[in-house]
Amino acid sequence: MQLLKKLRLKPWMDGLLAILYPEICMNCQELLNQHERYLCRPCITRLPLTGFEHSRDNPVSQTFWGRTPVHFAAAIYHYRKEETLQRLIGRLKYHRDPGTGVFLGQLCGKILRNAKDFSQPDYLIPVPLHPRRQRKRGYNQCEMIARGLSEVLDIPLETSLLKRRVFNASQTTKGRYERWQNVEGIFEMGKATDAFHNKHLLVVDDIITTGATLEACCSELSQIPGSTISVVTVGYANRY
């Protein structure tokens, strides 16, 4: 009964909080209504979509050609310096706001569910952080994005299948060759894989630049018998 009362009160309380403590859009600084978070609807529609999810030979898919088998690969938005998506990702990674990741995952999920080439995976696999980095950040940003995807697409989240066994330096300032060297052999299975035989696994990351980290993840997961591996990222950073 108490839970029922709380559920009935929640919309009313959310509306009151929106009046007393209004949030503003991160991009245009306009007031958000009680159903909006981080960005207003017009600013969401202005985020630069890639359209990669509608093409099998998009630039993200081509990253893996001849390197590791990937069934489907796409980045949902273009990631550019000094633009809204960069600010959202920065808030997620460096300002202890995991809700930003869930929000981005929800946006991506709404795009993916309308993509004709997207087949429903069995599990979402967020790219794992090393435990030391995750303790410092407080959470894995890719897991937060995957949680948002899971809510929209109704796909279970699996966070213990893959683990990062090596604590390596950040990829941010590294060149293409250094990035490939930096991720060699850094992932391993974190649990028995029997339950994942013949399953379709969707690897989730925040940004793809060279694809080195994602390739390392996919290569490890492809050792599971009968597995099908797909990839989705929020942003595509065409640096090279």
Image (cartoon, rainbow, N blue to C red):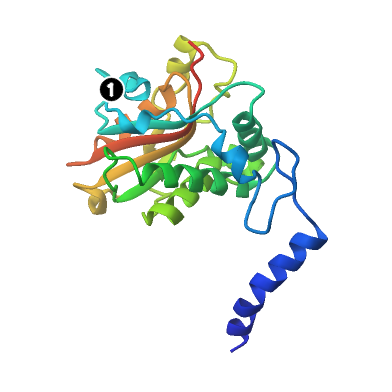
Which quadrant of the structure image shows residue 200? top left
Please tell me which residue lies in front, 17 or 225.
Answer: 17
Return the x and y of residue 112 as percentages of the image width and height: 38, 42
148 vs 142: above or below: below
Which quadrant of the structure image shows residue 10? bottom right
Residue at the image point whose x is 43% and y is 49% from the top: 159
Return the x and y of residue 119 as percentages of the image width and height: 26, 44
Please tell me which residue lies in front, 199 or 220.
Answer: 199
Query: Which three-letter amino acid code belongs to the residue tagged 1?
Result: Asp
Please tell me which residue lies in front, 179 or 131.
Answer: 179
- Image quadrant where one finds the N terminus: bottom right
Return the x and y of residue 56 as percentages of the image width and height: 27, 27
Return the x and y of residue 59 as percentages of the image width and height: 36, 20
Q: Which residue is mark 1?
A: 57
Q: Relative to 62, is 126 on the left or the right?
A: right
Q: Residue furthest bottom?
A: 1
Residue at the image point whose x is 61% and y is 41% from the top: 42
Q: Relative to 78, is 12 on the left or the right?
A: right
Q: Relative to 31, is 152 on the left or the right?
A: left
Please tell me which residue lies in front, 122 or 35.
Answer: 35
- Say whether residue 132 is visible: no
- Say whether residue 176 is visible: yes
